Amino acid sequence: MPIEHLRAMDQAGTAFDLQLLLMGYCRVTGFEWRFEKVSAPYHRLYLVSGGRGFLSDAKERIPLVKGRAYFIPAGAVYSYGCAPFLEKCYLNFRLEYFPGSDVFSAVRRCRSTPFDSGVVVPRLVEAARRGHLVDQLRLRSEVLGLLAVMAGDLGGPGGKERVNALK
């Protein structure tokens, strides 16, 4: 029986390092959540489950709406606000392919994708609250699944070219 060695899986199993620095869930009002020109040394993922908000910079204003996940890359500068409220799960994280090789190093702008906020956010929050090993694995899996969608069209370090080079 022929055996196919899947080399890319060898690398994927040991190479990715997801560092979840902070995770939270909040409902904020326009008075509480208004910041000008914010930048962070880590990536942020906002999973909007209610209300409306926005991110803005000199080039665009991005509406934050229920049922969309937003990836804000490290170093990107955005102003934030909402009216009358915004409800979201948020994660601050780093994701390296190999030590020192950030998966999202080529991303300079916010990205977003639809997701099922009525299922994903409660599942993430409950897993984080319980904190059991199985819950932690599910939480990481859910986050990596969303990040895989956000990284889907990347080339260069950490993207398709890096993965294809492993073949």
Image: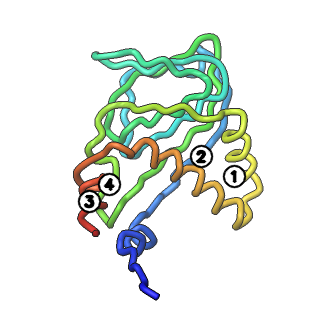
Location of residue 81 in the rendering, given as x and y in whole percent from the top left corner: 51, 17
Quick one: label 3 or label 4, which is nearer the N terminus?
4
State which tag comes first along the sequence, 2 or 4: 2
Q: Which is closer to the viewer, label 3 or label 1? A: 3
Query: Which mark identifies residue 1?
Result: none
Q: Would residue 117 appear left or right of 148 to someone viewing this image?
A: right
The residue pinned by badge 1 equals 128
Q: Are marks 3 and 4 in contact (CB under 8 Å)?
A: no
Give how far apart the Cα atoms at labels 1 and 4 are: 25 Å
Residue type at the position of mark 1: Ala
Pointer 2 residue: 23
Tell whether label 1 touches label 2 (CB within 8 Å): yes
In the rendering, which numbered label is found on residue 162?
Answer: 3
Which residue is most to the bottom? 1
**Separation of marks 3 and 4 at Cα, in angstroms:** 12 Å
- Vertical order, 127 against 16 (above or below): above
Residue 130 position within the rendered picture, expressed as x and y whole percent measured from the top left: 77, 56
Q: Earlier in the sequence, mark 1 or mark 4?
A: 4
Q: CA distance from mark 3 to mark 1?
A: 32 Å
Would you name the residue on which mark 4 appears? 102
Secondary-structure class at tag 4: strand
**Depth check, front residue: 55 or 41:** 55
Circles 2 and 4: CB distance less than 8 Å? no
At which x and y percent is residue 114? 54, 31
